[in-house]
């Protein structure tokens, strides 16, 4: 029914999830791809959620002005009583840079005519205007932001949450079915500038918030669907309830979950590998068909002419196969128990033994972490900025977030300079968090960074007086020359992993939210070709 189903084929419909990727094209333009799944519980129908969504979209310039604070004006005048709507918007963003958008919105509400509320669905697609003679682009004065998106609303039934035991759909068994309206969105947004000069600081600011308007949609819709939800606890009882709820969802990033049996882990891995085989097979078939038509592989991705219908169908089929694999990998990541380079860390009370324990695991942890990072970035260009992120809620209620990024430090003197700056940040983490995030953070332990080993035990005071505790072990090493991962040049690595059990600094699950982090940072020296101005 919907061509976008391939991207969400293996995703859980009732599990809130968000995936995002940011990168820079060869021409230097900023791009981002975002996919998210948002369930709306306790609603009456798809139409109820769609009405709120339409109100937001019809008044997009007002919402963009009120929420992020960037003045946005509409240059065209469209009737709200239509299934086709054009948005011709101009926004004043960072440093007064003007950004123009020209997109057409198509609304399909035929799925609302179903007899049963359980079968209702609606589809919204958005695509940018390539050329507009009535509202032409102004490349000499403005940046151009183009967007392509698919948004679908589907009604589903599941066991009512809050009764009985957890079932595989994320609801609780034993109760009556409840209606859940699921919003699934996929966006491709890119910003380009052809003639206007833009400062580096403005580019960085715009790049960091490419999907700001996209994120505002969910916030605005929640306010419309659930207008009575308070922003803050209104009394002590509700404050205690919120704190208890926050404490129940005890860990972030890599929370404690029920361990999945090895059989099912291997089964999931085999499924993911089989899907990769299917994609490669589809790619092979595409190349064979292209060869019959006299098309070289390098030309396959450059087919933009509507006349090349057969060729476009081949490429489109390949893209759908890749989207299906992306869905499978995304679904796998949200159910996996541990990352391959994670360690189980248990520390006693004796400080000498604690240090010896961490020192003993250092070398293997560094090797495993670097191997994981190398595989995870195998097909990425290390000289091009890139960001990928995935945010979701595990079935047990744990909030999780995964992030991969490639950041360039241009104009620095050496790898050691960047390595030392990172070491300074982690050694003074409580000061950095307090200054940058604004959350008061204190360190409960007292220790030095010795032999490339350092433990950081912090407690932060967040909004609504919620306390968040973190017990992080940092392992580090710097090499003047590293052949395997540094290409024979200087190389630095810092690995962070959380402590599972600490008898000297035990966790306080009844008073604090637990924040677990697993991460690896590598600092390398890369060479790239620069284009001369001559």
Image (cartoon, rainbow, N blue to C red):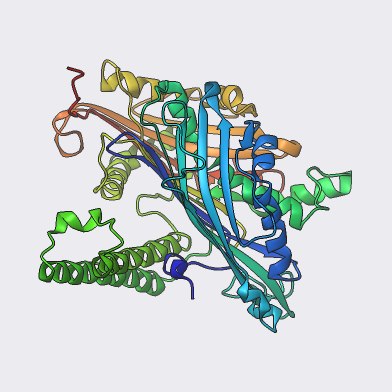
Q: Is residue 511 above or below residue 73?
A: below
Q: Residue furthest front?
A: 134
Indicate the position of residue 533 as horizontal and vertical percent values.
21, 18
Q: Position of residue 16 (x, y in %)?
A: 58, 59
User: Closest to the observer: 325 or 194?
Assistant: 194
Residue 210 at x, y percent in the picture: 49, 39
Q: Is residue 209 visible?
A: no
Left or right: 192, with 270 as reference point: right
On the image, which quarter does residue 396 sit in? bottom right
Q: Answer with left or right where residue 358 lies relative to residue 211.
A: left
Residue 252 % position (x, y)? 56, 48
Compared with 249, 321 (above or below) is: below
- Which quadrant of the figure contains the C terminus? top left
| Residue drawn at 24 percent across, 55 percent down | 301
What residue is drawn where x is 28% and y is 58%?
Answer: 305
In the image shown, does 27 or 107 lie closer to the viewer?
A: 107
Which residue in the rendered view is the most extreme toward the bottom?
Answer: 115
Looking at the picture, tell me which residue is in the foreground, 419 or 283. Answer: 283
State whether residue 495 appears in this view: yes
The answer to whether 381 appears left or right of 297 in the picture is right
- Height in image: 144 above or below 33? above
Residue 385, above or below 141: below
Q: In percent of the image, x 57 and y 27: which residue is there?
A: 433
């Amino acid at each position: 029914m919907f061509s976008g189903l391939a991207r969400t084929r293996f995703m859980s419909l009732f599990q809130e999830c968000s995936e995002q990727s940011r990168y820079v094209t060869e021409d230097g333009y900023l791009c981002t791809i975002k996919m998210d799944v948002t369930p709306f519980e306790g609603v009456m129908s798809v139409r109820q959620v769609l009405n709120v969504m339409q109100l937001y979209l019809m008044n997009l310039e007002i919402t963009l002005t009120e929420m992020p604070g960037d003045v946005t004006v509409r240059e065209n005048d469209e009737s709200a009583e239509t299934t086709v709507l054009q948005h011709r918007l101009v926004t004043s963003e960072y440093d007064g840079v003007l950004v123009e958008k020209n997109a057409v919105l198509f609304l399909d509400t035929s799925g609302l005519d179903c007899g049963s509320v359980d079968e209702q669905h609606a589809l919204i697609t958005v695509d940018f205007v390539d050329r507009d003679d009535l509202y032409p682009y102004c490349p000499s004065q403005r940046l151009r932001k183009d967007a392509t998106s698919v948004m679908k609303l589907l009604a589903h039934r599941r066991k009512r949450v809050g009764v009985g035991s957890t079932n595989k759909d994320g609801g609780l068994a034993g109760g009556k079915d409840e209606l859940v309206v699921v919003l699934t969105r996929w966006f491709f947004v890119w910003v380009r500038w052809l003639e206007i000069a833009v400062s580096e600081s403005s580019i960085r600011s715009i790049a960091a918030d490419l999907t700001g308007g996209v994120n505002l949609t969910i916030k605005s819709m929640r306010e419309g669907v659930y207008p009575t939800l308070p922003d803050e606890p209104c009394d002590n009882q509700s404050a205690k309830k919120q704190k208890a709820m926050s404490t129940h969802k005890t860990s972030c990033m890599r929370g404690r979950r029920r361990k999945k049996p090895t059989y099912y882990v291997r089964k999931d891995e085999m499924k993911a590998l089989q899907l990769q085989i299917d994609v490669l097979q589809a790619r092979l078939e595409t190349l064979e068909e292209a060869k019959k038509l006299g098309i070289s592989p390098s030309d396959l991705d450059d087919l933009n002419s509507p006349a090349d219908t057969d060729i476009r169908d081949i490429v489109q089929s390949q893209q759908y196969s890749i989207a299906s694999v992306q869905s499978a990998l995304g679904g796998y990541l949200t159910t996996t128990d541990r990352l391959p380079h994670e360690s189980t860390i248990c520390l006693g009370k004796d400080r000498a033994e604690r240090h010896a324990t961490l020192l003993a695991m250092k070398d293997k942890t560094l090797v495993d972490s670097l191997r994981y990072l190398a595989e995870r970035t195998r097909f990425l260009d290390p000289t091009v900025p890139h960001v990928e992120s995935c945010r979701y809620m595990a079935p047990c209620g744990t909030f999780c977030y995964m992030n991969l990024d490639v950041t360039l430090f241009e104009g620095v003197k050496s790898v050691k300079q960047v390595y030392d700056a990172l070491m300074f940040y982690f050694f003074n983490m409580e000061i950095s968090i307090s200054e940058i995030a604004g959350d008061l953070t204190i360190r409960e332990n007292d220790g030095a960074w010795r032999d490339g080993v350092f433990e950081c035990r912090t407690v932060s005071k967040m909004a609504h007086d919620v306390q968040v505790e973190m017990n992080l072990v940092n392992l580090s090493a710097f090499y003047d020359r590293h052949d395997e991962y540094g290409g024979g040049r200087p190389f630095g690595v810092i690995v962070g992993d959380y402590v599972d059990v600490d008898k000297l600094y035990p966790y306080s699950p009844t008073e604090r939210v637990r924040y677990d982090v697993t991460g690896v940072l590598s600092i390398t020296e890369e060479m790239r070709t620069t284009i001369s101005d001559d």
